[in-house]
Amino acid sequence: MSAERDPQAVPTFDPLEPRPLVEGHQTLGSLTTQLLHPVFQPPGRLWWTLFLLCTAGVALLGFAVIYTLIFGIEVWGNNIPVAWGFGITNFVWWIGFAHAGTLISAILVLFQQKWRAPIHRFAEAMALASIIQAGLFPLLHLGRPWFSYWLAPYPSTLNVWPQFKSSLTWDTVAVLTYLSVTFMFWYVGMIPDLAAARDHAPTVRRRRVYALLAMGWTGGTRQWHQWKISYRMLAGIGTALVLSVESVVSFDFTIALVPGWHVHIFPPYFVASAMFSGFALLLLMILPTRVAYGLEHVITPRHLATVGKMILLFSFFVLTGYVHEHFFGWYGGDPYEIFLLEFKRSGFYSPLWYLQITCTVLLPQLLWIPRLRHNVFVLWGISLAIVVGAWLEQFLHVVPSLARDFLPSSWKLFFPTWVDWSILVGTISLFGFLMLLFGRFLPPVPIAEVKESFEELVEHKEEKKHELQAGVA
Amino acid sequence: MRIRHWVLGQFDSAERLLEVVRHLRQEGFGELEAYTPMPVEGLAEELKLGRSFLPVFTFLGGLGAAAFVYWVQWYTNAYDLPVNVGNRPPYAPLMNVPLAYEAMILVAAATVFFAFFLVLKLPRLYQPVFEVEAFTSVTRDRYWVSIATHLPNEVEAAAQALRALGASQVATVPEKVHR
């Protein structure tokens, strides 16, 4: 049986060979059927329960947003000087998750990492859903979001153009670009699988819908050729994009003079931290989903262990970020910076800081132990801790610096209100809502790419067989 | 109005498909196309598909967009209505870079995305190959070859060639071409 069930079992495969990316006795036909199964089977009780819970959460979100629009940002915990509270915390948290999606989709294509194949569609959908959540916050926290069109350079009677030297303007363009490019990449990648859904759909109505979405894909060589070129180019563009978007988000902090924000390490640190939290969210969702949809032989223990190793690696990048922040803050000699870092370590919000370190640096170290790395419950628990730790990290970026800035007379702490919490819970529900719909209607695992992986595996096995026979003979 | 005949043959493996395509090219059949459940190495070379100019267009489009957005920022913030914000210089080259970079990426990605559909002439919901009910196996585990010809007497020759090469199914589809 698989090592997932009993890691102490004697492996039945050659330990010098990497574990196969597709397990069990499969054929192209059986893989197609299994990978289309989540789309064609009617949703069970579990799906409906989660869906109804998420719908309730979305209703809560709608209520909290309308309440905010009517009564203003006063109903949030924001005050002067802490003018950015949950709004920007949640924005950076959500945008961070999207980055692992693009890392897996785009960057790993460029590195030719085959193990990305079964999980990248899920990661991209997660990225899209996260960007949608992230986009809500800059809009809402403007206070008067109906004037957000002022950010575009249209000829107006206001006699003033947008301020393009501000990172807030850069954010708008960066997030919109990220949303568009992620959607384009996701959709182009999905067209062959939508064609597979079209060809094997159980009802005429579903066949028509998938036919529309598949746009007439036949699987012809010209189509595959163009698809491969477009896919690789979008991967390259996506890589350039993801590194820039998170850097632009970090510029929200770095171009300011507030102590604790004008830190040089923020752009790469934010990128690494974003990918770190995104991998964790991916595992958090994929671990139960692969069991619910019966996809354990396609999203194998090897994939999970690889993502676990990425999480371990990125925890060190994040640790480097923390060390840079605190060491260079001290080394620079700026008294305001030094005071702020002390406030983070021993002030009012310091328990959150220790919790953040535990969740993002200490707990992932458990993944050094192979037995734990292969245990799905441990992986899930650590992923949950990382997701919470990432939220705390963003909170502690935003709030302490504003609560304790230059003049003691301006100091004031931040406390969230029920509206803040409702919007946070609401965006989590909207995210779940979108992911559940994705899992229900669109093929969650890329069928064509898994089949390509499988064919390579078969070829490899045959080559090995010939080698062995030649060796024996 | 002419009729283009599509002769289709189904095969069971990618290696067989590559051999079939090679044979058909050698026998002189013109409009060949192969259909596969996933991309197959070597097929594009067999069918002599040309080089794509998409990377060049994308690069130029991206650079053009970056230059344009950089110019818009200079024009609006430094030339037309400069506003003193914290005594910062109205024209700051480095501060104009993030937006220019993002615009470059957006236009480059949009070029690739729309070029994908334009080059393949998609959406094209009706394809002659869809007339064959068995063709749905192409997204499952079978490999198909199509030979398109305007000459009715070539149809039989093509069908025989496919049968001789071991096609598990052969079908013919007439397509009315309005040109």
Image (tube, rainbow, N blue to C red):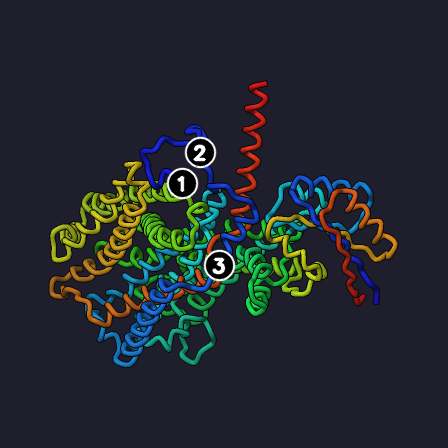
The residue that disc 2 covers is A18
Name the chain under label 2: A
Counting from the top left corner in percent of width and height, residue A7 is at 32, 36
Q: Is residue A460 above or below residue B118?
A: above
In the rendered structure, which amino acid carries the disc numbered 3? Answer: Val
Counting from the top left corner in percent of width and height, residue A370 is at 31, 36
Mark 1: few/some/many CA within 10 Å (<14, 14-19, 20+): many
In the rendered structure, which amino acid carries the disc numbered 1? Answer: Arg
Q: Are marks 1 and 3 in contact (CB under 8 Å)?
A: no
SS type, badge 3: helix
For the point 28% across and 81% down, the residue is A70
What label sits on residue A62 in the rendered view? none
Q: Earlier in the sequence, mark 1 or mark 2?
A: 2
Q: Nearer the viewer, residue A105 or A287?
A: A287
The N terminus of chain A, quarter of image: top left
The residue that disc 1 covers is A302
For the point 66% across and 58% down, the residue is B120
